[in-house]
Image: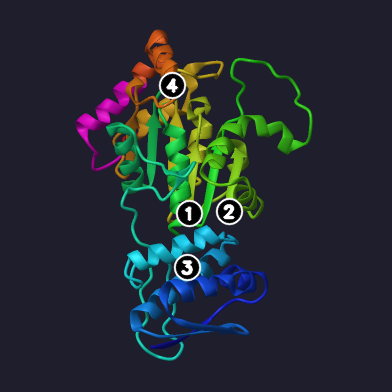
Amino acid sequence: MNVTIRVPRGADRVTVLGAADRNLKMIREALGVNIAARDDVVHLSGEDDSVRAARAVLERLGDAAERHLALSRREVLGVIADVSARGGGAGAGVACEPDLLGGEPIDLAPAPWDGRLNVTSAGRPIAPKSPRQLAYLESIRDNDLVFCCGPAGTGKTYLAVASAVHLLRAGLVKKVVLARPAVEAGEKLGFLPGDMAAKINPYLRPLFDALHDMMDFATAKRLVMTDVVEVAPLAFLRGRTLNHAAIILDEAQNTTKGQMQMFLTRMGQRSKMIVTGDTTQIDLPDPRESGLIDAIRRLRRTRGIGFVTLDRGDIVRHDLVQRIVEAYGETDGQRRTRRATEEVGASGPAPAPDPD
């Protein structure tokens, strides 16, 4: 089988082929195909299955180039292994054009998410550690909007970021947006020094910490610099429409009702939203104005929205965190949220949303 594939020019060509055509050499050695590049085309020849697999790998590298992602050697080897495991053809990861020399097109549309995360931390796969965390990931997979409430240390933010990174790597979204309301936690910090980025960075630090735990610093910095990953205060999202994106709102208990409405209406086509919060840690002057509690009450019977409640049994931080949460007990805010989410589970989705 002989196939010719067009590749981009300039910096994107290096992303696809690798420095000194390193990626082509890895494809040749791993898949046993004859491969040669000249100008803006790559020629493949060999056994049918091997050529299809090689083409699938190059198409995925081309998709990464379009998103300005420079893959490391290990990541390219991971793409080759993934394509090989899928049989080299259908479901390998991205859409491609018909063979330039004739023949049937190969369907390489993004494979659906089966609920497992293709994300690692310290070399180990990230996976749910409790039945409720598993239900959380399944809800993210099955719904375009998910609300997750729970106390500190239950993994609600960490698993949300891991899901977003997985969706990005799988080609199911083109952008990750991580947002938080810039609300002081009971302290009056006054005017912080520095430019705008320096002022808001302390509020966004937990999201950066989760992101850096799942990829090396250089990769995370490159994704942020190229705007593939955006970490921003909630107010910066006003007026935008976010298409093909995984969007996370963290610390949502500190949004007002108006801010929550603004955030939820940013969702564009083929996007997923994950809203996380802990109603025991509301830092608003009037906790009754929490947009998280209000949204759960208003949307509890709306189809297509998932609701998950994690509790102290899902805490995965230091053992003392669980004991601390137990010592402080359940507040009125947490009881309201628990009753709202339990009502969702009891009644199931309704044919139409609440009139309010």
Calculate the distance from the C-alpha at mark 4 to the C-alpha at mark 2: 31 Å
Give SS at disc 3.
Answer: helix
Q: Is the residue marked by circle 3 packed among few (<14), some (14-19), or many (20+) residues within 10 Å?
A: many
- First in sequence: mark 3 or mark 4? 3
Vertical arrangement, residue 337 with respect to residue 228, above or below: above
- Total numbered labels placed on residues in the image: 4
Per the image, is 339 magenta?
yes
Calculate the distance from the C-alpha at mark 1 to the C-alpha at mark 2: 9 Å
Instruction: Identify residue type, mark 4.
Output: Thr
- First in sequence: mark 1 or mark 3? 3
Residue depicted at x 50% and y 63%: 76
| CB atoms of marks 1 and 2 within 8 Å | yes
Per the image, is 39 magenta?
no
The residue tagged 4 is 279
Vertical arrangement, residue 246 with respect to residue 261, above or below: below
The residue tagged 1 is 168
Instruction: Identify residue type, mark 3.
Output: Arg
The residue tagged 3 is 60
Calculate the distance from the C-alpha at mark 4 to the C-alpha at mark 1: 29 Å
Q: Quadrant of residue 189?
A: top right
Instruction: Give the residues in magenta.
Output: 337-353
